[in-house]
């Protein structure tokens, strides 16, 4: 808690904050980092395998193999989320499962599953896009800003 907020607490509340902080279990930082590294590496290796598979057996180029690879990883992530496997993996690996494509697919699938009792349109569709909308908007806006910066940079001769 910040010092400014801590000053607004009464003496008893500050004492309780210190008491709670002293008894909070220490997180195994090194172990968590190792698990995240291993899980993220395995997910990326699976993606690399699919890219190689599409390049070898379907004659895709390295550039064109990216789309079916991403689609495959999204489908696998959604499937594992719906079966409850991805949640167990995420509990063990932590941040290692937030590899962009699979983590995003897991988030959207989880929202859809959680709200399916409210109906397919308002429950699944509405709540699924509550999560997807801001991410897509941020991505489009970021791409716009990067494109403007690139145009300005090229207009100035690359300084």
Image (tube, rainbow, N blue to C red):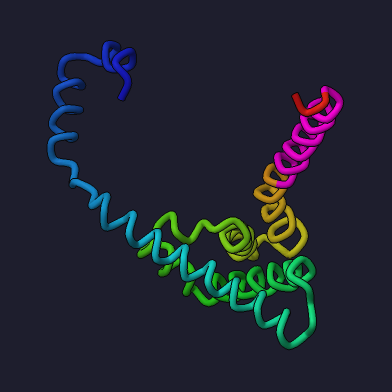
Number of callouts:
0
Q: Which residues are magenta?
A: 136-156
Q: In the image, residue 60 lies at what x, y percent?
A: 79, 77
Q: In the image, residue 35 lies at what x, y percent?
A: 34, 62
Q: Quadrant of the C terminus?
A: top right
Using the image, determine if residue 52 lies above or below residue 103. below
**Residue 123 belongs to the span the image colors magenta:** no
**Residue 150 belongs to the span the image colors magenta:** yes
Q: Quadrant of the N terminus?
A: top left
Going 24% across and 49% down the picture, which residue do you hit?
A: 27
Q: Which corner quadrant of the image does residue 73 belong to?
A: bottom right
Q: Which corner quadrant of the image does residue 134 belong to?
A: top right
Going 83% across and 30% down the picture, which residue do you hit?
A: 154
Going 55% across and 70% down the picture, which residue do you hit?
A: 81
102 or 130: nearer the viewer: 102
Q: In the image, residue 152 lies at what x, y percent?
A: 82, 25
């Amino acid at each position: 808690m910040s010092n400014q907020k801590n000053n607004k607490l009464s003496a008893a509340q500050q004492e309780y904050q210190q008491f709670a902080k002293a008894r909070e279990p220490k997180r195994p930082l090194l172990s968590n980092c190792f698990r995240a590294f291993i899980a993220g590496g395995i997910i990326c290796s699976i993606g690399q395998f699919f890219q190689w598979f599409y390049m070898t057996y379907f004659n895709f180029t390295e550039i064109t193999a990216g789309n079916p690879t991403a689609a495959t990883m999204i489908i696998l992530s959604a499937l594992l989320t719906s079966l409850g496997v991805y949640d167990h993996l995420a509990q063990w690996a932590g941040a290692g499962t937030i590899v962009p494509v699979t983590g995003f697919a897991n988030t959207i699938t989880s929202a859809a599953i959680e709200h399916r009792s409210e109906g397919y349109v308002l429950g699944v569709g509405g709540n699924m896009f509550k999560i997807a909308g801001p991410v897509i908007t941020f991505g489009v806006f970021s791409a716009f800003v990067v494109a403007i910066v690139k145009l300005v940079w090229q207009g100035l001769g690359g300084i």
